[in-house]
Amino acid sequence: MPFHPDLAKKLEPLRGLTREGLAADPEAQRLFAEFVREPAPWSVPAGVTVEDLAVEGPHGPVPVRTYRAGATSGTALLWAHGGGFAHGDLDTAEAHVVAAELAARSGAFVVSAGYRLAQDGVRHPVPIDDVDAAWRWLTERAAPGARAGLGGASAGAALALATALRARDRAGQGGRAADLLLLAYPFAHYPNPALGDELAAEMRELPPFMRFHPADIEGMVRTYVGRISDLPPDALPGAARLDGLPPTHIVLSEYDDLRASGELLERQMREAGVPVSTYLARGMPHGHLNRTPAFEEVDASLAYFAAALAAD
């Protein structure tokens, strides 16, 4: 379907703008602020209790934020925000709004992981180590015995998937494997798979600052791993062995250069015998969970994940 009409209207003055142009132009920044402004205020749903904690990890304490609904379901979820491995925190909507909404909608105990970002010399596997430490804390101390899942968005989806691979491989030695995976517009492959002709034509209508061009993707990988050759399989885990993973639910953004990665990951999982389903958020760009449920497709994406969490 066409790009979301409300967003398209706000994007029209920004057409042709690059990331560099946005950074240098105050008027463009004002227009961009209007583009990202939510149509309605959002607050933590009633009955959800939020608490900031820290758990021990191999590189020091890992900040986590927990979300408990008034009525709990016996399911737990560890969630990792996106941001190209180098950006984002526990306050971004892709962390805070998503975790609070999933707790409220499913009754799950949700923990958002504030992993170390790929900045100031931090590289792979440190972000995975942090998410893995939060996973061990969740399954061994905070919610032992609970049905437990891993989830994340974009780069955070890659971290969640890599952590699930570690958990799968430890399961025979007494570790706790994940019971389900929730992956939003995952960044799982390098090089990023090519877009089909129809999607490529649609993507050309977006401003350059909203695109993931090959140089942008290469830059993210260099920032995260430090190189673009001989990548560890779990860095962009579409390259890893995927059999033995739990049922997986993938949300895709329709207008997204990384959609091809999510679609390839689905095919790889099916081939490996992993039960997998997908939901396509029509008319939405990459990162649409950084917005609130005031947008219909954000609400629908959250409902899709919440239904997976609430299922037996």
Image: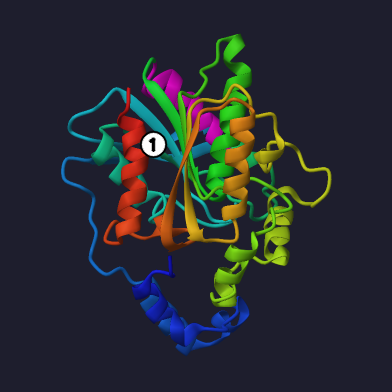
Instruction: Tell me which secondary structure the magenta stretch mostly adopts.
Output: helix
Q: Can residue 32 be seen in this view?
A: yes
Q: Which residue lies furthest to the top in this view?
A: 173
Q: Where residue 159 sits in the image (x, y, percent)?
A: 58, 40
Q: Where residue 167 sits in the image (x, y, percent)?
A: 57, 23
Residue at 59% of width from left, 25% of height from top?
Answer: 273
Q: Where residue 234 sits in the image (x, y, percent)?
A: 68, 36
Q: Which residue lies furthest to the front in this view?
A: 198
Label 1: state its secondary structure: strand
Q: Specify the quadrant that holds the C terminus.
A: top left
Q: In this view, does 148 lie to the left or right of 62?
A: left
In the rendered view, tell whether residue 47 sits above or below residue 260: above
Q: What stretch is highlighted in magenta?
A: 129-144
Residue at 41% of width from left, 59% of height from top?
Answer: 282
Residue 142 falls in image quadrant: top left
Q: Nearer the viewer, residue 245 or 23?
A: 245
Q: Is residue 165 left or right of residue 145?
A: right
Q: Mark 1 points at which residue?
A: 111
Q: In this view, does 306 lie to the left or right of 17?
A: left
Residue at 67% of width from left, 57% of height from top?
Answer: 220
In the rendered view, tell whether residue 20 sits above or below residue 299: below
Type of residue at label 1? Answer: Val
Number of numbered discs overlaid on the protein picture: 1
